[in-house]
Image (spheres, helix red, strand yellow):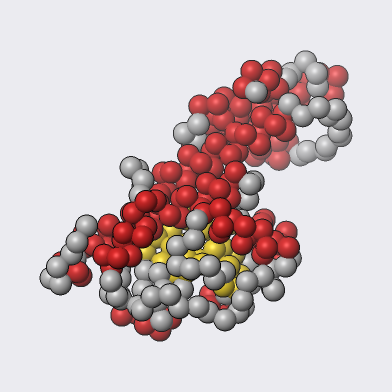
């Protein structure tokens, strides 16, 4: 891909950059999900000439964001956490506590290692963050590229991560695959104990409804069937009491077939 000066500000350029940035975010998300990191979403922004980004000495960017539960486990609050890729400075980890009023760059811990390190290296950086989120990386921001410069060169660096479908669709499939893997492993784990859990009828209904949502929303056929069978098992156990715990195990039987 080569752009003339006239094309350099075109919507086609923005779309092209967002496609390859999104592919890069999806590649990082895939490694993280394999390592059971709860990725919530990815994003990509490709307007290389957006003047509003000058306030941050940046231009294009992408992000991999995590669940609020991950933030609570990591930092003790439910704020927003994620990995930001900046087209000028590469990767950083950010944490925005709820109601803090801080900007993303205020909390950034920069990875270094160049503008487009391999996804496995980004995952290794997050492992360092999980050990010590306030000291991993560096508070000093690196600069590998001038803002708004050489979009063609930036595209070529990222082109290897391009995907046939959109990054959101790719990550949805990856999340479903990771959830399926964890669910099968949990259902078929050895030496499981029977636990007493008291539920209000409304809580059981809500849980069954959430599993029904998964059944309808996931693109993964195996996960869809696991959700349906698990909801059915729980409903029947609630009806037939604790003595039926080993009778109503359709989800377990199906998970055994998937191993």
Taking the image as shown, residue 135 lies to the left or right of residue 11, namely right
Taking the image as shown, residue 89 lies to the left or right of residue 212, namely left
The quadrant of the rendering that contains the N terminus is bottom left
Taking the image as shown, residue 257 lies to the left or right of residue 169, namely right
> Where is 173 relative to 237, above or below?
below
Q: Is residue 64 something one can see in this rendering?
A: yes
Residue lying at the far top in this picture: please name it: 247
Residue 74: % across, % down:
71, 62
Q: 233 or 122, which lies in front?
A: 122
Taking the image as shown, residue 187 lies to the left or right of residue 140, namely right
Q: How many marks?
A: 0
Q: 258 or 145, which lies in front?
A: 145
The quadrant of the rendering that contains the C terminus is top right
Q: Residue at x 50, y 56 (%)?
A: 118
> Where is 167 relative to 207, above or below?
below
Residue 9: % across, % down:
20, 70
Q: Residue at x 37, y 51 (%)?
A: 160
Q: Residue at x 50, y 78 (%)?
A: 142
Residue 42: % across, % down:
47, 55
Q: Residue at x 68, y 20 (%)?
A: 256
Residue 152: % across, % down:
26, 65
Residue lying at the far bottom in this picture: please name it: 55
Q: Quadrant of residue 98?
A: bottom right
Q: 214 or 113, which lies in front?
A: 113
Q: Is residue 241 something one can see in this rendering?
A: no
Q: Quadrant of residue 3?
A: bottom left
């Amino acid at each position: 891909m080569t752009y003339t000066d006239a094309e350099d500000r075109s919507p086609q350029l923005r779309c092209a950059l967002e496609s390859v940035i999104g592919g890069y975010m999806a590649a990082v998300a895939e490694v993280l999900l394999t390592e059971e990191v709860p990725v919530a979403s990815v994003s990509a922004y490709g307007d290389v000439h957006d003047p509003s980004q000058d306030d941050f000495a940046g231009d294009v960017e992408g992000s991999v964001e995590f669940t609020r539960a991950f933030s609570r486990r990591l930092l003790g609050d439910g704020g927003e956490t994620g990995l930001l890729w900046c087209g000028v400075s590469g990767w950083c980890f950010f944490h925005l506590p709820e109601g803090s009023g801080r900007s993303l760059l205020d909390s950034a811990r920069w990875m270094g290692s160049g503008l487009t390190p391999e996804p496995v290296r980004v995952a290794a950086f997050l492992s360092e963050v999980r050990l010590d989120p306030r000291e991993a990386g560096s508070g000093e921001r690196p600069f590998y590229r001038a803002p708004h410069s050489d979009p063609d060169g930036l595209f070529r660096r990222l082109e290897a991560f391009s995907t046939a479908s959109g990054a959101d669709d790719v990550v949805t499939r990856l999340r479903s695959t990771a959830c399926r893997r964890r669910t099968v492993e949990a259902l078929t784990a050895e030496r499981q104990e029977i636990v007493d859990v008291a539920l209000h009828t409304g809580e059981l209904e809500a849980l069954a409804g959430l599993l029904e949502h998964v059944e309808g929303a996931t693109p993964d056929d195996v996960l869809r069937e696991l959700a349906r069978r698990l909801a059915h098992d729980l409903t029947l156990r609630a009806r037939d009491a604790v003595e039926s715990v080993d009778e109503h195990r359709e989800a377990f039987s199906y998970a055994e077939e998937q191993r």
